């Protein structure tokens, strides 16, 4: 849990420090702009951008029942963020598993990627696909619907 929030908190602390130095130099407008940039970076890197994560075992059960893909991800991963953004509203239809919160999810990713925790790893019909094209994932969602 602590790892997931490390980067967003670091961005907020850096933004606060830089904004404080700008205010002390007499530039409150620049301080607000800098802090806003760092706050946006913190928000984008936080787990709040992603739908609620579930455990790997629960995701496998749900996927077997409804045929929807499972996405194994971790906070701070730019490729995971790209996938999330490109899926748009359809991202809520996918089963998301945060590998930093779920050891079984991390083990599944390592098994699929020769011991590496490469994310996003998308599992469709029991077959893992590492860092697939978001358009392909949307296509898989259309097939499962």
Image (cartoon, helix red, strand yellow):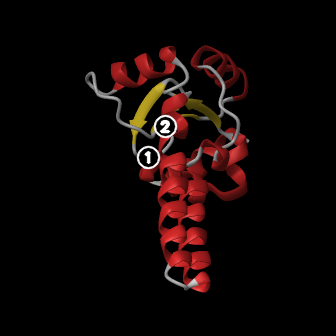
Foreground pick, 48 / 134 = 48
Picture coordinates of residue 112 (x, y %)? Answer: 36, 24
Q: Which class describes the residues within 10 Å of circle 1: few (<14), some (14-19), or many (20+)?
A: few
Q: Are marks 1 and 2 in contact (CB under 8 Å)?
A: yes
Q: Secondary structure at mark 2?
A: loop
Picture coordinates of residue 106 (x, y %)? Answer: 44, 22
Foreground pick, 120 / 15 = 15
| Residue at numbered disc 1 | 77
Residue drawn at the location 52% of the way across and 54% of the way down = 13
In which quadrant of the rendered image does the N terminus lie? top right
Q: Is residue 42 visible?
A: yes
In which quadrant of the rendered image does the C terminus lie? top right
Picture coordinates of residue 116 (x, y %)? Answer: 29, 28
Q: Is residue 142 visible?
A: no
| Residue at numbered disc 2 | 74
Picture coordinates of residue 57 (x, y %)? Answer: 60, 14
Residue drawn at the location 54% of the way across and 70% of the way down = 19
């Amino acid at each position: 849990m602590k790892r997931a929030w490390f980067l967003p908190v670091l961005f907020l602390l850096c933004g606060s420090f830089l904004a404080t130095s700008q205010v002390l130099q007499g530039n409150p407008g620049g301080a607000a702009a800098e802090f806003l940039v760092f706050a946006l970076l913190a928000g984008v890197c936080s787990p709040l951008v992603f739908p609620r994560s579930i455990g790997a075992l629960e995701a496998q059960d749900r996927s077997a029942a409804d045929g929807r893909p499972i996405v194994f991800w971790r906070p701070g991963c730019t490729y995971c963020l790209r996938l999330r953004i490109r899926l748009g509203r359809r991202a809520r239809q996918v089963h998301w598993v945060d590998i930093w919160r779920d050891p079984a999810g991390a083990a599944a990713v390592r098994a699929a990627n020769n011991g590496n925790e490469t994310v996003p790893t998308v599992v469709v019909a029991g077959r893992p696909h590492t860092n697939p094209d978001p358009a392909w994932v949307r296509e898989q969602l259309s097939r499962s619907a």
